[in-house]
Image: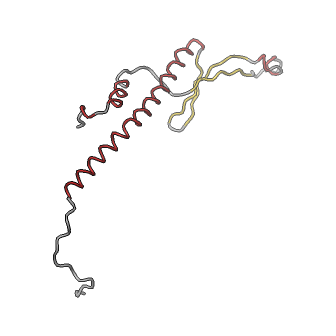
């Protein structure tokens, strides 16, 4: 178990931010205007006359890209959730960066303890086996 008194202040502050959950998601929102399938529609000739805007949420799950349409009413909530996800990712990265020096210090303590334990003792003298064994 970790001694919480030994937790560096930046690590403690960053970990406290994780205790405040909120809805978040990965992905992006894109606006699209599209042509329809009718040959005599103005959208076929004029790009400004295309239908829309339509909004799509695009996400990658398990190596596959998935998109779905969302309504314009859902956009503010969706954008807030995506921004919360980006902030979460940034906090996780900052947490990693704060934990690395702490982990290095722990390794150095272990290495110093091992060096103190060994005390630079010499090898005990004793019989050594011959380089060429007489056994077959």
Q: In the drawing, does residue 78 fall left or right of residue 21?
A: right
* Residue placed most toward the observer, 127 or 123: 123
Q: Position of residue 98 (x, y in %)?
A: 38, 35
* Residue placed most toward the observer, 83 or 129: 129
* Residue placed most toward the observer, 34 or 131: 131
Q: Is residue 98 above or below residue 37?
A: below
Total numbered badges shown on the rendered structure: 0
The quarter of the displayed image where residue 70 is located: top right
Q: Position of residue 73 (x, y in %)?
A: 57, 11
Quadrant (top left, top right, bottom left, bottom right) of the N terminus: top left
Q: In the drawing, does residue 75 fall left or right of residue 103?
A: right
Residue at x 34% of width, y 24% of height = 16
The quarter of the displayed image where residue 57 is located: top right
The quarter of the displayed image where residue 102 is located: top left
Q: In the drawing, does residue 63 fall left or right of residue 7?
A: right
Residue furthest to the front: 120
Residue at x 35% of width, y 26% of height = 13
Q: In the drawing, does residue 120 fall left or right of residue 28?
A: left
């Amino acid at each position: 178990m970790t001694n919480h008194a030994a937790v560096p202040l930046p690590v403690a502050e960053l970990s406290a931010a994780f205790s405040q959950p909120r809805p978040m998601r990965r992905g992006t929102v894109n606006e699209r205007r599209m042509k329809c399938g009718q040959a005599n529609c103005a959208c076929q000739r004029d790009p400004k006359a295309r239908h829309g805007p339509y909004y799509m949420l695009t996400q990658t799950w398990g190596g596959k890209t998935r998109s779905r349409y969302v309504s314009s009413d859902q956009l503010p909530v969706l954008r807030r959730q995506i921004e919360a996800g980006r902030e979460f990712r940034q906090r996780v990265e900052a947490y990693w960066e704060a934990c690395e020096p702490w982990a290095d210090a722990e390794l150095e303590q272990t290495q110093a303890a091992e060096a103190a334990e060994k005390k630079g003792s010499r090898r005990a003298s004793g019989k050594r086996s011959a380089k060429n064994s007489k056994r077959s």
